Image (tube, coloured by chain):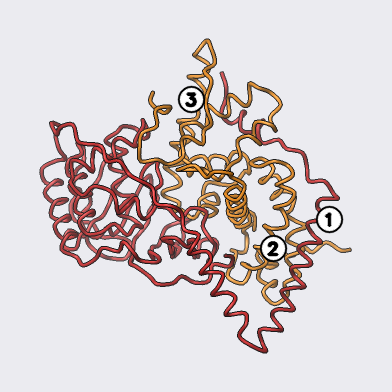
Amino acid sequence: MIILDELLTDTAIVDDLAPATACDGRALLDAAVAQQAQSARASLLGSRGTRRRRLRIATVMSAAAAAVVITPIVALGNGQPSASASAATLLREAGRAAAAQPGGWPDATYWHSVSTYLRDGSTHRRDIWIGHHAPSVLRDSGYVPAVVSVSGSFPAGSVALTWDQLYALPTDPDTLAATLRADIHGAGSSDDAELFVMVGDLLRESPAPPELRQALYEVAAGIPGVRSTGQITDSQGRTGTGIERDGQRYIIDTSTGQLLDETQDGWQSTYLSQGPADSAPPAGRS
Amino acid sequence: VGVDKRSDAALVSASRLEPALIGVVYERHAAAVYRYLARRAPIAAAEDLLAEVFVAALTARKRVVLQASDSALPWLYGIAANVLRAHLRRAARKPPLHADHGMDWDAVDNRLDAQSQRCQLRHALANLSAIERDLLLLVGWEGLTPTQAADALGITPIAARSRLHRARTHAQEALAALEASAVPASIDSPRATAPSRTPNPEEQQ
């Protein structure tokens, strides 16, 4: 039997960094340190540094990735039993409330989300600015307050969507459910469990417009096994409706359609705010 | 030359005013960052990009504060991933739609001596999304904890947890399936499984 961990250990083996290469790298780094010290002095004398930085950001923006065409998959029918009646009713109520919110941000520069999460018994604050085209920036008191994240995309189950792909998702609930299900490819403990996860993914830190949010709640209302756990208070003391399936629980404010909190296997995240932003803190590298 | 005994967090913090201290971070972590690059790109590229990663860290150092006990490595791996991605994007002659620039598979194939290992690794990773694969390898190759890997990738710990679990399950299943099949199936580049809205025929099971 092939053991995954053994395979990873075996394939991780690489030759060590040669001392000469290490010295070359250090020399290049030292040169950059010296150059930076010089330009720091120069920027005290004028605003050249600022102008140069602006130019760099403009270059990054113009290097935006090409848009990707999304092919929606047509729904094949809707004969499945839905979530428990009360959960479905509450989810649809949340969907209507979400649709009534202002919004739709197809052209925003960043999506800024603020949350807290529990790690090693203490609560940490997480700010993320996900760039539409620019690199994303993460500030996390649990580890690194600012770092350019590798992925500026929006996860939905096993796939990662770009901002534009998110906006190209269908907002008809049946078509949306079929589109999302087509991307499951056997992930999760079951297709229904995975679809429930994907709904959370797309609500959590995402610029999904009001009509897509409503469709997502409608999709959740159609997932078998979803049930309501009644009124629950989240870690911030806000009261919402608990919606649960297979140990994954969302707390939703059904009067605004906002996802307040999420718990999974004892891990908890609480979502404080999300919205469009024109800029992000300097990411450190262009 | 005496060895600087300060923690990564203290060094990175002090480097705000004293940028040369990034050199100490380099001495401490260049070998690990090099291995990260060499596992995913040709040796020549790994050698070239090593300094680029630390120069990028030099620029980013002022906006980074590490927890006292934290290693700087997850942060450096996050930067290395960006540098590598940019390099592979530049190197791609014709960027394909849904290109996965996190990994140079030709280089990985060249690096692994045994054909069986190449085949097994490709099978194990073939049906994973880029995020799942990055998580699995940061844990399996670089030895990060799941939470550190989440930090390096900029996703929430809760999202990383379920994805990592899924990645392990899928990879192990793919290995079991490979073993069960008498004739090893030939697999095209896992790049074809980069996040895609349209179902990929190769992924159909």
Q: Amino acid at mark 3?
A: Ala
Specify the subunit that label 3 lies on. Answer: B
**SS under mark 3:** helix
Q: Earlier in the sequence, mark 2 or mark 3?
A: 2
Q: Which chain is red?
A: A
Q: Are marks 2 and 3 on the same chain?
A: yes
Give the drawing colour for chain B. orange
Which residue is under mark 2? B55
Could you confirm whether marks 3 and 1 are on the same chain?
Answer: no
Q: How many marks?
A: 3
Horizontal side of residue A25 vs B41, given as left or right: right
Q: Left or right? Give the position of A185 relative to A50.
A: left
Q: Depth check: A162 or A71 in front? A: A71
Q: Which residue is mark 3?
A: B174
Looking at the rendered structure, the kind of residue marked 2 is Val
Q: Secondary structure at mark 2?
A: helix
- Residue B62 visible in the picture: yes
Determine whether the residue tagged by mark 1 lies in a helix, strand or loop.
helix
Q: CA distance from mark 1 to mark 2?
A: 14 Å
Residue at 58 percent across and 29 percent down: it is: B121
